[in-house]
Amino acid sequence: MNPSTSESLKNNIPLNILLADDDKDDRYFFDRVLKEISIPTRLEVVKDGDDLMAYLIENSNKLPDVLFLDLNMPKKNGSECLSEIRKNEKLKHLPVIIYSTHMDEKNAEILYGKGAYYYIRKTNMKELAGVLLIILSLLIEHEFVRPVKDKFVFFDQSFRVSKLKTI
């Protein structure tokens, strides 16, 4: 978590969220859901992997509190971006959550090994609201840590806050 997150939230300053996703509809729904939940947020959006890396390098002294990263993007995919983020000294501590329609065990293994925090599925707006509320609440409560491997894939319908508390 960004060191300024705690202080910002005490002063009711929004969480800074970066979404990297090439799909216009997915960006719209993500933004809409953020506006409906009770946690104040500020969303920045990039549309491909090249734009993401340029944004992060340019803003390396003022990183977002969390990055939601789509896997399938043009120019540079999410997995490639994650590798670059973890190799960069200024970026390597940025919490990255993989946000994708495609979920499989092989990808989960690779992404966990590269240092992603969670792997969540693009879903309907109601489920997305629940997932974002849990994740952003953990950020606020200073309980947002990288989980053990068997809790890395975040299945919306079966996931419960109590499971997170045991990480």
Image (spheres, rainbow, N blue to C red):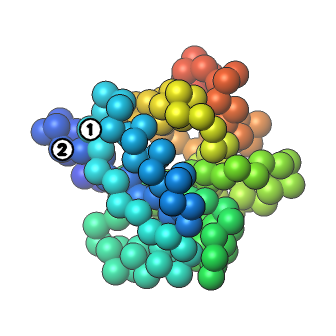
Q: Which of 23 and 147 is in front in this view?
A: 23
Residue at horizontal 63 percent and vertical 38 percent from the top: 123
Q: Distance between the residues labelled 1 and 2?
A: 7 Å
Secondary structure under badge 1?
loop
The answer to whether residue 89 is above or below residue 156 is below
- Percent position of residue 114, x then y: 68, 63
Q: Nearer the viewer, residue 72 or 143?
A: 72
Residue at horizontal 76 percent and vertical 36 percent from the top: 150
Residue under numbered circle 1:
40
User: Which numbered circle lies on residue 71?
Assistant: none
Secondary structure under badge 2?
loop
Q: How busy is the neighbourhood of tag 1: few (under 14 within 10 Å), some, or many (20 plus)?
A: some
- Percent position of residue 34, x then y: 38, 40
Quarter of the figure that contains the C terminus: top right
Q: Is residue 66 left or right of residue 147?
A: left
Asked where in the image residue 90 lies, by quadrant, the reply is bottom left
Disc 1 and disc 2 in contact, CB within 8 angstroms: yes
Mark 1 vs mark 2, foreground winner is 1
Residue at horizontal 42 percent and vertical 37 percent from the top: 33
Asked if one can make out residue 94 in the rendered structure from this viewpoint, the answer is yes
Residue under numbered circle 2:
13
Asked if one can make out residue 88 in the rendered structure from this viewpoint, the answer is no
Residue reaching furthest front? 25
- Percent position of residue 108, x then y: 77, 51
At label 1, the amino acid type is Pro
- Percent position of residue 97, x then y: 57, 51
Residue reaching furthest right? 106
Asked where in the image residue 155 lies, by quadrant, the reply is top right
The answer to whether residue 73 is above or below residue 142 is below
**Mark 1 / mark 2, whichever is N-terminal:** 2
At label 2, the amino acid type is Ile
Q: How busy is the neighbourhood of tag 2: few (under 14 within 10 Å), some, or many (20 plus)?
A: some
